[in-house]
Amino acid sequence: MHHFAVRDGHLHAEDVALATIADAVGTPTYIYSRATLERHWHAMDAALAGVPHTICYSVKACSNLAVLQLLARLGSGFDIVSAGELARVLRAGGDPARTVFSGVGKRDDEIALALRHGLLSLNVESAGELARIEQVAAALGLRAPVSLRVNPDVDAGTHPYIATGLRTSKFGIDIGAALDLYRLAAASKHLRVVGIDSHIGSQILELAPLIEAIDKVLGLVGRLAREGIALHHIDIGGGLGIAYRDEATVTPAELGRHVCERVRGHGLHLIVEPGRMIAGNAGILLTRVVGTKHNGAKAFVIVDAAMNDLIRPALYDAFHALAPVVANSTAPWEVVDVVGPVCESGDFLARDRSLPHLDPGDLVAVFGCGAYGFSMASTYNSRPRAAEVLVDGAAWHVIRRRETVGDLWRGERLL
């Protein structure tokens, strides 16, 4: 569900016409709906009401400070994968004690920063990382709260680039080897075992692999308990998919019904790390048609947004719905590729898409861009990054100004 809808032939974000924002801010621009962000967060919170829980929003999905501030005010925790993301959480008023640190490549300085700020947990990805965390904690005279990220070898049924729970993945510790590492951590005076973590992938559209992974992890929890290693929490990761076109998805309510009962039986605090589920359909990318062309049998609509603004189609061959901002019921429909100005054949937003005829100057909305849209943007081809706008009812706010050409070389110098 989202709050983007057509009224009187004009596409709106909540109560604001998208054309109004385009006229004031220009294009391309990312536009987020506050009502949608809040709706999705509350849906997850309500679904898990049956057990003590913490929602740790995955910062990498959409990391704008205003979005993080909005979620922090709802009581959200956060899932981070870098010192930069931790700095964003802190700047936005997030609580470090409700923040978990994931990722396979934590540097020693990042580990130290996390320990100084009192994060809820460092999700450990390997035996070597566990040893480094112990060393850093010892040097600081602290005990590091650790949770092992176990790899349950479960196929999430998603794109290979975003599948993280298979034995061949770089993520996590083989579940068969985790018990020995837990014993080492429990015996260390510089480590404090607090939990167990699993995350099998992103854009997951079926419940079965999630439940299979959780059941495998809970089996290990039982073995740990029999050895006297008690855990505070189980972190089941995130990964719930959204409907980019007409896919059937797993709802938070469905997840909660199956997970809460299992977790309650072990007396554990539940942590989830949703990102896409909260932010994905809460944002669009607004772009303007620059021109059209035909190249033999192929028709193209050229827009001012490109793969540097939204890389998901080029990277994952991902589908994003597109629609004209101003409806024209008499326009003939055409099959076109919607492409950008970047000098790559992979620079497309849609291929072989049936759309109403578009002319130069027309505005187009690209849906489902709230997650992994701006956060994966670049300045390739020396293209300044887009502006970001947050809509709140009838009001709207620029929450990131459009970059300028001067911003592109900030920090560089001529010799």
Image: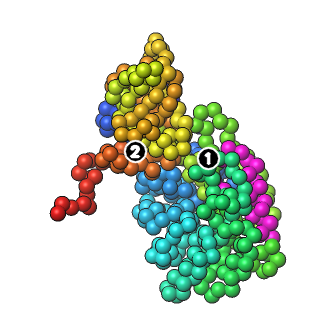
Q: Residue placed at 58% from the left, 37% from the top?
A: 244
Q: Quadrant of residue 190?
A: bottom right
Q: Is residue 285 above or below residue 187?
A: above
Whole-percent x and y of residue 138? 54, 87
Which residue is under mark 2?
308
Q: Left or right? Give the position of 377 relative to 367.
A: left
* Identity of the residue furthest to the left in this view: 415
What stretch of residues is rendered in magenta?
Answer: 200-222
Q: Is residue 264 above or below residue 193?
A: above
Which part of the image, by quadrant, shows the N terminus? top right
Q: Residue placed at 50% from the left, 75% from the top?
A: 111
Q: Residue placed at 73% from the left, 47% from the top?
A: 207
Residue nearest the viewer, comparing 85 with 410: 410
Which residue is under mark 1?
159
Q: Quadrant of residue 302?
A: top left
Q: Magenta segment: does it hold 297?
A: no
Whole-percent x and y of residue 404? 26, 47
Residue type, label 2: Asn
Residue nearest the viewer, comparing 61 with 153: 153
Dominant SS in magenta: helix
Structural crowding at the residue carrying mark 1, measured as other residues with C-alpha within 10 Å and reported as few (<14), some (14–19) or many (≥20): some
Q: Quadrant of residue 176?
A: bottom right
